[in-house]
Amino acid sequence: MPKMKTKRAAAKRFKKTRSGQLKRNKAYKSHILTKKTAKRKRNLRKPTMTDASNVKNMKKILPYL
């Protein structure tokens, strides 16, 4: 059976933590920042964990992570 391919777009966006969870950066931080409050932009800086409902799909597209 051939090797599975990793989706490179996902591999660039997600990292695995020591506990096996997937870490991701938050969206909505790239443009139209003038109307967003400083508090909101500051919170968008922090990475967060991928939601449990998406983990099954993420493991499928990132088989070797």
Image (cartoon, rainbow, N blue to C red):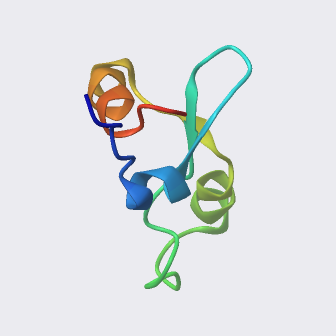
Q: Quadrant of the C terminus?
A: top right
Is 43 on the left-hand or right-hand side of 31?
right
33 w.r.t. 25: above or below: below
Q: Quadrant of the N terminus?
A: top left
Is 38 on the left-hand or right-hand side of 56?
right
Which residue is located at x 56 percent, y 52 percent? 25
Provide residue 45's location: percent of width, then percent of height. Answer: 67, 58
Point out the residue furthest to the top here: 19
- Residue toward you, 42 or 25: 25
Number of marks drawn = 0
- Residue toward you, 4 or 13: 4
Which residue is located at x 40 percent, y 26 percent? 51
13 w.r.t. 35: above or below: above
Provide residue 3's location: percent of width, then percent of height. Answer: 35, 37
9 w.r.t. 22: above or below: below
Point out the residue furthest to the right here: 18
Q: Which image quarter: residue 41?
A: bottom right
Provide residue 48's location: percent of width, then percent of height. Answer: 59, 37
Provide residue 9's location: percent of width, then percent of height. Answer: 40, 61
Which residue is located at x 57 percent, y 58 percent? 40
- Residue toward you, 24 or 60: 60
- Residue toward you, 63 or 38: 63
60 w.r.t. 36: above or below: above
Is 24 on the left-hand or right-hand side of 2?
right
